[in-house]
Amino acid sequence: MSKLTSSTWFKQSIRLLHHELRKGELTIVFLAIVLAVATVFSLTGFSDQVKQALTTNSVNTLAADRVLRTSTLIPEEIKAETERYGFDFAQKVQLKSMVFSSDNMLLTDLDIVTSEYPLRGDLLISKSSDLQNPIAVKSPAVGEVWVDQGVLGRMDTAIGEQVDIGVASFTIAGVIVNIPDRSFASVFSNPTIIMNIADLDKTELIQPGSRVFYKYLFAGDNDDLIEFGEWVKPKLNESQDWVDVKSSQSRIGRTLDTAEKFLSLASMLGIVLAAIAVAVASRRYGQRHKPTVAVFKALGATNKHIQKVYVLHWSLLSVISILTGLLVGYGLLQLGAMGIEKYLSLTSSSLTLRPFTIAVVTGLICAVAFAIHPISKLIATSPIAVIKGFEEKSSSKLNVYQTIPLLALFLLLYIFSNDLVMSASLLFGGIVVSIILLFVGKFLMGLGRTAGTKAGKSMHLAFANLKRRANENSVQLVSFTLAIQLLLLITVMKSSILSEWQQQMPEGTPNHYLINITNEEVPKIADFAAENDIQTQGFFQVFRGRLSAINGEATVKVDKKSDKADEEATEGRRGVGRELSLTWQEELSPLTEVVKGQWWDIGDETPQVSVEEDIAERLAIELGDQLTFTIGSDEFTVPVTSIRDVNWQSRQLNFYMIFNKSTFSEIDSTSISAWRVAEETKPLMFDFLSQYPSISIIDIDAIMKQLTNMIDQMSIAIELILVLVVLAGSLVLVAQVQASMEERERELAILRTLGAKGSLLRNSVLFEFVALGAIAGLMASIAMEIAVFFLQTQVFDMDFSLHFEFWLIGITAGAAFVGIIGMLSCWRLLNLSSVTLIRRTM
Amino acid sequence: MKVNSESILKVNGLTKSVQLEGKSLSLLQPVNLQVNAGETLAIVGSSGSGKTTLLSILAGLDVPTSGEVYIKNQPLHQFNEEQRSQVRAEHVGFIFQQFLLINSLTALENVMLPAELANIDNAKEKGMKLLDQVGLSGRLDHFPSQLSGGEQQRVAIARAFISQPDILFADEPTGNLDTKTGKYIADLLFDLNTRLGTTLVLVTHDPKLAARCNRQVRMDSGVLSEVIDETQTQTQQNVESTINSENEKKADNKDVELGEGQTCPN
């Protein structure tokens, strides 16, 4: 009785691995693991970078955990309570002021901050005007200011030079690269200058009646902050606002957040596909090795021996695949990073440990969880198989969907997304869809069989094959369908997201806002615009006022946040119940539509108001309601005579409340206008407007540029993911076809022997795959539409739309995709001579 | 060829039945059989008669429903899978109709496999020598897919002999080969068997091949009976004497070598 030395199984295992790797027998499973690891590695790294990019571009940060916004100083009571909690505390005073250099002046937004600012996020400053080498800082030193790059350009000044603000002089000490709580959405913003709060008094800027905004910033324990928030909220009046990160998000911020969610969803789908590929490939791995194990056992190898051989074999294969996956993933990540770098001045491509860890864990989960079943079945192969044959029992057709792989898949998704709900719904949705597809697929293949009998010979053979392999095919069909569905889903979602973005910047979008135009100036400015072919929407007289009562009922308690309010004014979110921009108009704007009631006739002397649809709905305002407004010390009440639908995404000047002219006949105010100015007209415009120093011009081209860059950057990310998903999908297809290869070989041998022509066989195989692909494409289109419905309405907060054009694409692409890949996979087989074929299968 | 009275294989009252749609189907009626060391036994019978079932139980690949099977006095019927593997590794060799070489191993590695499993030293050298003796010294590093059917079966024969098994089971060893190659393979098998004094149990439906064994049993619907046929016995004895005379000198020499003048048809 001699025991096997440990070296025997080791040698045999290495030998098998060596030969099989060289002969390409492990290619599919190798590629599947490589792809899973590479996908996770590159996408985790990539989305980290995108997130970082989004954060540094500050679309959703407050520079604190909570902010109290107010237009007055806060009472001592609140200050005392803040100290009691021991929060970190900073303060920011915001006001507008003209700034002067030796030759120029410019209207700027002043951010006057305490030395603790910011509490969260990075305030980044560069010492050079080209924004290189930014450093994170707190407030500027006394006597110094930091300025936006725009200030340097437009005032023709430089770092180290002096500017006058109010009655004081300051040295420009740096250029602002990032302000963590800059309102990204506020297109009205002027260039910003940051100053130390200790300098505020000596500027003498704050005078009685000055428009000043205060931000009190808090950071600390979340529970304490919630408690404090509950305590402070009832004490706030309508001009004060307690804000957390979520409620501070602007519309664009949310859009980018949506994009990030989408990236993450697409990546998760990619991972699901890669995992399916691993599952299919490892199942085939198990089946292919059965004869080897049976022979080993017949020749006297014990279970323990086989176990050692195969555990080592699979482990080495996994390790090689995971390492290769990491390399490939790193390459992809670098590629993606190169793409981003063009658009973001601030991408630090430093690699963190997170993507690395997640990718390795993914690889291990794939390698262990998806292989444990096929390998344990493989090890249990009975030696009697050498006599009885290696036919796979059909009962095992749903192995892929058994518990361990499912749990593993869930774990994978969760690790990647860190989002329990999203992972669970993706997985369980997937299972339900798979089961439905299984039945629908069988039914459709059955129908195809009936149709096939009436068609030509190859078609007949193709459908007979489809029908006969219905069980295996329905599993394949589910994979094909999911792959095609995911591709469709990504394409559809990408196009809707991109078009939503595009809609935010349609043709003719204004690129300059003119504010503070006096009534006497309006005709001259309008003439200039007309002479120079500048598109304007007209001039709007703007009054700041509050809606103080509806039908005599005070609105103070109405504290509803308004999503659209950030397009309303410099200060962004100021819901109804606070000050609104009010205007009058005689004729309805072209992009606007009256949905209820009637627009007034020009010259109608009765004061009346037209209300925007959303806000009317929110405040339950109906036609005929009496609305009371307060402007300064004046109060007046008017009836609602129409309700308007406004396209808020147009970036035109829009108003919640529009009055007829006679309402405002007694009140004096300045006007604003939105202009689309062609690049070549700009110098002329600036030259002309320099005659009117009180008019402020806001150039929003720069902001638009930043938005476009964001979109480009997102597109690159989406395309990268699309490529990975297509690769994963193809791999699933190839793995599936490979799994049916032995059976196909036998069949072809029989058909050849019976005298079937090469062309007949080729066509029948082609039709079989094309039909399978077309059925999968059809089912994928339906599934895609359902998924899109849920995503658009539930996750992305968009309107639902049908996409029939994508059905055609789905079916055609499915047929072509599966047809081509299927044919390519079988090509070698179809071109073997009859003799070889018969000999191979005997 | 020496046949001594030492019993290599002993079977008492062996039966095999399977459950089919709730009914018990008997594949083997009680079988009694003894094969002594150095003996060559052919199990003949038509397709479906149960001869392959018997072979798989005799070789310890399958278990009987009742009865006893001993190989070298080891009670296979009482052994579990692992113990039976051990017995196969130490005492049993196989040749299959389908050759059953491992596709991802080279010819030499396939041959070395049983020796490695039985922990026999110098597996490589022995394997090379055996492959040389079956005329495949130039094909050591070829994979099965690169070999013809006859060549594959020659590799299988080399593999069967490398661990110098006490008993060799061959299931239709020429069944997948054309007549000419089949004859060559049979010559090779009997030649090696004679030189090494291996006990051979052969399942075949080819009377010519069966006739080359010293003893034949017939399987008919699960019933095993001894074949006593004067002419066949005569033929078999003639064949045996021819081989014996050719290899007389080396009969007791366990060092295997293929006789000169034997050429490979494939």
Image: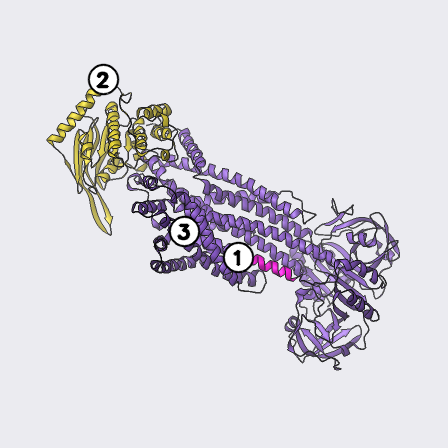
Type of residue at label 2? Lys
Q: How far, Cα to Cα, is label 1 from label 3?
A: 26 Å
Q: Which mark is residue B263?
A: none
Q: Count residues near mark 2 (Cα–Cα under 10 Å), then give few for <14, some for 14-19, many for 20+.
A: few
Colour that chain A carries in the picture: purple
Residue nearer the viewer, B26 or A774: A774
Residue nearer the viewer, A570 or A525: A525
Query: Is any part of residue B130 visible from this angle?
Result: yes
Residue that badge 1 annotates: A489
Q: Nearer the viewer, mark 3 or mark 2?
A: 3
User: What residue range appears in magenta?
Assistant: A493-504
Q: Is residue A179 left or right of residue A367?
A: right
Q: Secondary structure at mark 2?
A: helix
Q: Please, is residue A556 above or below residue A750 in the view?
A: below
Residue that badge 2 annotates: B249
Type of residue at label 1? Leu
Q: Secondary structure at mark 3?
A: helix
Type of residue at label 3? Leu
Judged by its main secondary structure, the magenta piece is helix
Which quarter of the image is occupied by the N terminus of chain A?
A: top left
User: Which chain is mark 2 on?
Assistant: B
Residue that badge 3 annotates: A766
Q: Nearer the viewer, mark 1 or mark 3?
A: 3
Which quarter of the image is occupied by the C terminus of chain A?
A: top left
Where is residue A218? Give x, y as percent: 71, 56
Residue nearer the viewer, A520 or A300: A520
Query: Is any part of residue A421 visible from this angle?
Result: no
Q: Earlier in the sequence, mark 1 or mark 3?
A: 1
Where is residue B152? Give x, y as percent: 32, 32
